[in-house]
Amino acid sequence: MDIEKYGPWALVVGGSEGVGAAFARLLAADGFNLVLIARKQAPLDELAAGLRATGVDVRTVSADLSQPGALAQTRALTDSLDIGLLIYNAGANSVRGRFIDLPREVTQAVIDVNVTGQADFTRHYGALMAKRGRGGIILTGSLGGYLGSPTLAAYTASKSFSRIFSEALWAECAPLGIDVLHLNIGFTATPAMARLGMPVDMAESPETVAREGLENIANGPVWIVSTPGNAARARLISLVDGRAATVRAHAIVPREDTAKAAAQLQNQVAR
């Protein structure tokens, strides 16, 4: 990773575990100083201690990204730093159900993290990168952003926002010297997925996902992680015609069936 262009500081939002932690470890290995944001302080402290042992400076912010003060909390720590890379990796979804049945605070939290938070952090740190004429932004998304799925209305819609937002931002920021990438992630073996009870035997590793993001930051606007079946599924569920049949046939499966569906898709691609 080019520290001259994207350093000396990287900000990883959602950086305490899983893909976010993998980003942090890879960047630390390349000499980047790090600011890590997540809701729980203990995992942040544990990761930060290990990264500091490699010789880099690491600072942490415990913030709830669904709350309006998260950016202000982060700015209190970063306004004196030269942030050259923003990785917005927050946005897991823990609750499924019909949109009209779910409490507003549940669905609004998904929108606040995946839409409002992503836009606010990007605006602030992107503007600083524009002033210095270089930098990079990685916004992680999901294959779920290609198709509205029952019981995941707010989540899939917010991931769709992230992808379209990234494409527009990429076109706007390229002349400013800022690389923008929407990193489209499929089924990944993260602690968040494990806590939801999802079998992760067929899942991609967080390290592979993070490495592909960093290696392809200049290959935007969208990079689909190369897990077998990911690109094929994105094409399949992006069909313009016959959307009713597509939505009914390819909705995201229940959590207990995720590993089976991933295996089936990979087998289809391998044939």
Image: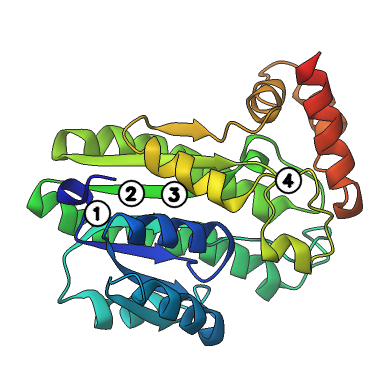
Tell me which amino acid carries mark 4. Ala
Mark 2 and mark 3 residues within 8 Å of each other at the beta carbon: yes
Residue bearing the label numbered 2:
137
The label on residue 126 is 1
Q: Secondary structure at mark 1?
A: helix
Tell me which amino acid carries mark 2. Ile
Position of 95 relative to 250 (above/below):
below
Q: How dense is the environment of label 3, judged by Cα within 10 Å: few (below 14), some, or many (20 and up)?
A: many
Does the rendering let one see residue 244?
no
| Residue 22 in the figure: left or right of residue 239 | left
Tell me which amino acid carries mark 1. Gly
Tag 4 or tag 2, which sits nearer the N-term? 2
Tell me which amino acid carries mark 3. Leu
The label on residue 203 is 4
Mark 3 and mark 1 residues within 8 Å of each other at the beta carbon: no
Pick whichever, 39 or 100, lies toward us.
Answer: 39
Mark 2 and mark 1 residues within 8 Å of each other at the beta carbon: yes
Query: How far apart in space, not on screen, are marks 3 and 1 (Cα)?
Result: 12 Å
